[in-house]
Image (cartoon, grey):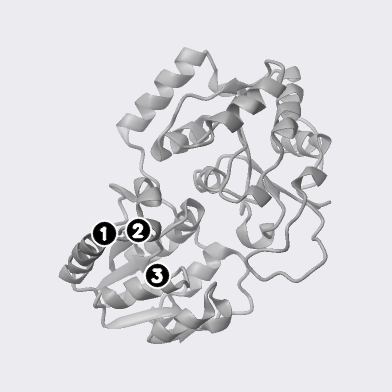
Amino acid sequence: MKALVVRLSSIGDVVHTLPAASALRAHGWEVGWAVEPAARPILDDHPLLSHLTPLPAARRFRLAPARAAVAALRAHGYDVALDFQGLWKSAVWSRLSGARRVIGWSRRWRREPASALLAGERVELPATVTHVIDENLALLRPLGIDAVGSRDFALPRPPSAIQEVDRGLAELAVARDDLVVLNPGGGWPEKLWPAESFGGLARALRERGLRPLVSWGPGEEALADRVVAVSSGAALRSFPTTLPGFVELARRARLVVAADTGPLHLACAVRTPVVGLFGPTDPARNGPFAAADVALRVRTPAGKGDRFRAPSADMAEITVDDVVRAALRRLGLEGGPRAVAL
């Protein structure tokens, strides 16, 4: 039996779908995955996958690469395609895969409701399911798999990533026992905590003997530099990392502080303690799942939102003192609440 996981992007979404791939493997399925370029490094050489089919990015669509991707998908002879993303593009790729069954969410549970037309089997989200990881696991129920609650990510540890991080930390003279990773970047501007606030957090952590390291991804160098500049020397800018390299960096950190972004979810996946900062998205759905982790969220603003995001929220409402208390609590240095709606 062969199953195709269709979760094309983003990094956090791909991470949150890995437990579903793990559950498929545990129940005897051979698993393939269709993914766009940005999130591919998470899945390269992943032990859960028998096949990985790179797809052209939607924003750079070209007919010839799309035809090649369709041919590659159909060559595997999938029995079922699972559209975890609920978009037109994911629905189209699920259909084009040639799988005999196409399973996806019904209209009300999709980001692009009309795309449900392309799903042969439409699934309703159970009322008891809250977290997005469990949503993904619930999509397996038409296959007779009930794995809600599983948190198996099985992220690999490429030797090149281990060497990359060993070398970078040695050059910065940062010891693992002191390392706190601050990740100020993210996909939506509305999700981001101000650089000045990250700088204040870095100063407070440095005063307590910790060494804040500011991580960054492509295009985020200036933001990382801004955090370092306003930290008055308390923070160091990280060396560049690949996605597997960031995973290895997160494994070594005592704590990761980030907004609702891929790095936060990668840290959660490898069980690193985290403090998550939330505004337009709901930590109950997207946030940390370990009981000891801390999620801080701004007041939900007035206005109409949906299950994926609330109206714009002012992330600056989360104060530096809020995050310092949360970080110290998660590190076991001071008491404080596990989850706070400010």
For this rendering, which residue is in front, 241 or 146?
Answer: 241
Residue 176 in the figure: left or right of residue 235: left
- Residue in view at x 40 percent, y 35 percent: 242
Q: Which residue is mark 1?
A: 53
The quarter of the picture where the N terminus appears is bottom left
Image point (67%, 15%), residue name: 233
Residue at (76%, 24%) from the top-left corner? Answer: 204
> How many C-alpha atoms fall within 10 Å of the one at disc 3: few (<14), some, or many (≥20)?
many
Q: Secondary structure at mark 2?
A: strand
Q: Of the numbered discs in the image, which one, if any, rests on residue 35?
A: 2
| Disc assigned to residue 161 | none
Mark 1 crowd level (few <14, some 14–19, many ≥20, 10 Å Cα):
some
Measured in 3D between alpha carbons, the distance from the residue under mark 2 to the one under mark 3, in whole angstroms, is 10 Å
Relative to 81, residue 313 above or below: above
Q: Can I make out residue 148 in this image? A: no
Q: Position of residue 70 (x, y in %)?
A: 22, 68
Which residue is painted at 49% across and 68% down in the image? Answer: 136
